[in-house]
Amino acid sequence: MRPLEGSNAVRARALAYEQALPSGQRKCLGQYFSGLPLGKLLAHLALNKDTTTVLDSMAGHGDLLDAAWESAEQQGIRLQRLDGIEIDAPTALACKTRLAGLERQTKPPEQRIIAGDAFAPASIAALPLQAYDLVITNPPYVRYQARQTDGGKLDTVRAGLAKTNGTHSEPSRHIWRTLIEGYSGLADLSVPAWLQAASLVRPGGTLALVAPATWRSREYADAIRYLLLRCFKLELVVEDTQPGWFSDALVRTHLVIARRLSSDEMALPLSQRRDWGSARWLQVAPEASDDDSLVGAAFPGLQPEFQFAAWAFSASPQPVQSIQVRSFSLREEWTSLALRAKRKSWQRKLEGTTDKLPLFNSKPSFVQPPLPEALRDILPPRAPSTPLMTLQDAGIQMGQGLRTGCNRFFYLTARTSSRSTVTVEASAFFGHRRFTVPPNALRPVLRRQSEVCGMSNGSGPNGRVLDLHGWVLPEDSDHIVKAVGTYTAQGANPLQIMPEDLADYVRTAADARLNRGHGGLRIPELSAVKTNVRSARNGRDWPRFWYMLPPFMARHKPAAFVPRINHDAPLAEANRDPAILIDANFSAFWAPNGQWPRFALKALLNSAWCKASMEALGTPMGGGALKLEAAHLRQLQIPHLQPSAILKLDKAGQLAGPYPPDVQEAIDGIVIGALLDQPPNRKSVSLVIQALGERTQELVTSRRKRSK
């Protein structure tokens, strides 16, 4: 059924409204709307014959509600209610006007569009129903830093969620309350938005979401992965492939379809669940689309989305060109999640302590997480002969490099130096001003990937971190005088007074207002900088000021590192000796017990096995790059390597930059040999190395692929 001309005009006005929204407002509120083609695809997957009430809790100007209504008519489903919540009043009005102006063949459902915050109890109370047959929404992605500038908005979000949770009955109330209280404060706004949307689905109803692919990779999103497993039956995940449905999106897009479980089904902890089943995972290539539909070329006809949904849920989907389908094990999803979230407070409360979980009782030393599916067919049968282990089980820690809270102030560029001073250049925000700094107030730092090559060749980067833990502004010196007893008692030297050139730079920074993206705040007012301040307490701590970074940790000066954003295959590099600081643009590795020297770490991470694993575990981004964060790397598995093998890796890896073929072959032989027979068969090792290289290239090509 083609939309009527009146509906086309209404949609054109909605699109014009969207395009006229100020970019700053769109970023602040996460106003990146789904679009009707994507909405129709999601709606056809989500609707069933029993659907009569539909809600979009983050409605925007109505793309998903419009799509759900039209798709329901195409399937012969009569909707009774079509409701939405939208935080921005003008956008809520645009949504209401759009739905009222659509021309349909049947009587319109009752509609209510609420202009209000979906996390405010008043907005939820204003809904005509407490739960809906279908909640279909596109949760906004707004970073936690952006929300914190708005008067502590995140606390308001959590508090609002907690109050609206009162409408649940046990045991779901306990589950939601625990997840609401326990999800990370570093989470972007999509996490509480998922929780809110999911809570408004009736038992047996459907949750349908548009989500970035990072919902399964970011640690702060583990709470919603758990929610989907505990309270829902995940049925379908549909993902786009490069260049994707949103050409300007930073990461790939997923459509998630899940059915709400009954209270009795939710009551059973996941650690006690025996009947898991599986979901389906579909990959839709750009070639599946035509001018009118995202799947129009794959399913030609008047209703391609309906045909696609019927095919996706059929008992045995027949192969369709440009669409791949595979099974997604929910048991393995729980295994992976349980290992990663075992220290989270919400998991301990909902599942019990780790040592009581059946999952963790089968192997006393460590539990093997599932291998990435992309690597499962590479190892020969009955391999590995010894269990794989995570990097952490092998004594390797990982994290993110240095975050200063305000790089434009703390990061400088060294220009010239003498015995007593270093001339540095500030960022563009300070007009590239040059001034002198005492050498012991600076620390070398690797800031970006372009500097790695020079570092590999033996020339250190010219980036410097302003490290003022030993220096104080003259006007702050009174605080130091008062705390002199604390310095003496702890054997520390009192702070020195900054030279005038340096002090003038710090004062200038203290008074400078940042751009609109930071709400016009001054640098000392930034949420990540305010925490630098510490008062003298009980004779134990001396004062610390906003311009003093906290003590540097092992993750800030690691033994080895790999870029977080990779356009080619990931390439790890070893730190210098002595170690320099590494920026948060890199994921960091170190071994607290000294078992892994820096070159051994570099060699291991650059092995064919680890490179293929990184490609399989990382998140492909919209531009074809691979995002590789600590959350991904904690899932990376390696064979058990004896101390002698680690020493061999350390010896083989002591070269800068990419390894020549003979060195790479030696490294791969050590790692792959440990995966296979003991002693390893050279032919079988070579075959696995070749297969890993080919699979890595396939994965790189896939994420970088462009439609012709």
Image (cartoon, helix red, strand yellow):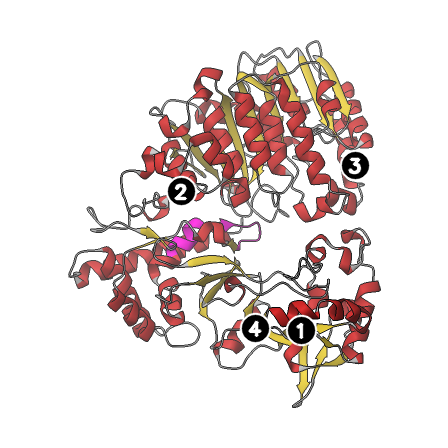
Q: Nearer the viewer, mark 3 or mark 2?
A: 2
Secondary structure of residue under mark 2: helix
Q: Is residue 437 left or right of residue 589?
A: right
The residue beneath circle 1 is 470
Q: Within the magenta stretch, is there residue 622?
A: yes
N-terminal label among 2 and 1 = 2
Counting from the top left corner in percent of width and height, residue 44 is at 55, 23
N-terminal label among 4 and 1 = 4
**Which residues lie in the magenta part?**
612-625
Residue 57 seen in this snapshot: yes
Q: Is residue 54 left or right of residue 625?
A: right
Rendered view: 99 above or below 119: above
- Observer-nearest of 144 and 546: 546
| Residue occupying image coordinates x 55% and y 79% | 460
Q: Are marks 1 and 3 in contact (CB under 8 Å)?
A: no
The label on residue 451 is 4
The residue beneath circle 3 is 16
Q: Do the residues labelled 4 and 3 touch (CB within 8 Å)?
A: no
The residue carrying pointer 4 sits among few (fewer than 14), some (14 to 19) or many (20 or more) residues within 10 Å by Cα, namely some
Q: Find the distance from the CA under tag 4 to the CA under tag 1.
A: 28 Å
- Observer-nearest of 262 and 330: 262
N-terminal label among 2 and 4 = 2
N-terminal label among 3 and 2 = 3
Q: Which of marks 4 and 3 is in front?
A: 4
The label on residue 339 is 2
Q: Do the residues labelled 2 and 4 touch (CB within 8 Å)?
A: no
Circle 4: residue type? Glu
